[in-house]
Structures are given as C-alpha cells and as structure tokens.
Amino acid sequence: MSHFKSPHAWKSTNSRLAGKPAGKVRANGYVTVYLDGKNQYVHRLIWVYHFGNIPENMEIDHINHNRTDNRIENLRLVTRAENALNLGQRHPIKRNGVTWRPEHKRWYARITVHGKRLHLGTFINFEAALAARLHAEREHGFQHVRRIQPDATA
C-alpha cells in the first residue's frame, strides 16, 4: 500500500484492475511487468516461480512460438543454440534447410549439427527434400523446431 496516496486509491486501483492480465506486450512480442524498478519478462518470472533460477547459458523457449503464451506447459529450458533454431529467416525454404538450385533444377536438403553442415541429398521435388530435412531434424533431436510450410514455387 505504500505506493498509493491513500487506502481508497489502493482499493480503487485493485478493484479496477482485478482479473485483467498484468504487464504490457513489448515491440519484440514479449510480455513484461514492472517489478523491482525494471521491466521483467513474464515468461522468465513464471519459470523462476515454478522451477527456481534459470541456469547460466540457458534460455526459456515458448514451445508454440507465441511470445504472449506464458502458460508453464508452453515454456521449456533450452540452450541458446537450440533457441536459435526457432529464429525465422526472410526466405522460409532456407529456414527449413531446403533450397532450390535453378542451375541444377533440383532441391537440396541440408542440416547443421554442432556447427557442421551435413548434406542430406538432392531431390527432384520439394516434398522429398523437405521430408529428408524433417527426418534429419528428428534424428538429431530438433523436434522443437518451428515447422514452416513454404510455398514450393518460391
């Protein structure tokens, strides 16, 4: 109550805001609340509340990639490298590790594992190349990677 001018102001504010979500959605898509003199990311606070401190070099990932969905079942602890797999790129086919090579009239599939690029093959159609990429993702434990279904004509 020390933040309010009077008990009436405290009661009035609490009544007006009761049941409404706390925080503000920032330009980067994450929800923050002002706490202890600075803006704090809500997903990190929720993780700490449920599981304790976040280990060094670890990040909290939104499983469904919705940065405002801070339900505990939508959050998981990942390394920076794992979280980087979720970053989109301008060209979604490249995001999937599948690229069209017009000079060969073929689709190329690849994946990078522990900094090493692995060639998965060349394919006549996009679907086969994407299937090879998805198989490699499962094989190397990338199940959490966002699945973007690009337009094969791009």
Image: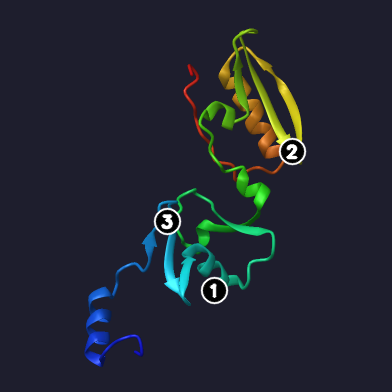
Nearest the eye: 66 or 135: 66
Amino acid bearing label 3: Thr
Tell me the CA gap for discs 3 and 2.
Answer: 30 Å
| Kind of residue at disc 2 | Val
- Residue 59 lies left or right of residue 152; in this view the side is right
In this view, 49 is above or below 138? below
Q: Quadrant of the N terminus?
A: bottom left
Task: Please state if 108 lies on the left or on the right of 10 as rendered.
Answer: right
Image coordinates of residue 49 in percent, x first then y, are: 54, 74
- Upstream in the sequence, badge 2 or badge 1? 1
Q: Which residue is mark 3?
A: 68
Residue tagged 1: 49
Q: How is the image coloured?
A: rainbow
Q: Position of residue 98 (x, y in %)?
A: 61, 25
Image disc number at residue 144: none
The residue singled out by tag 2 in the image is 113
Q: Is there a contact, CB below 8 Å, between mark 3 and mark 2?
A: no
Q: Residues within 10 Å of mark 3 (few under 14, many from 20)?
A: some
Residue at (34% x, 67% y) in the render:
21
Task: Say which element carries label 1.
Answer: helix
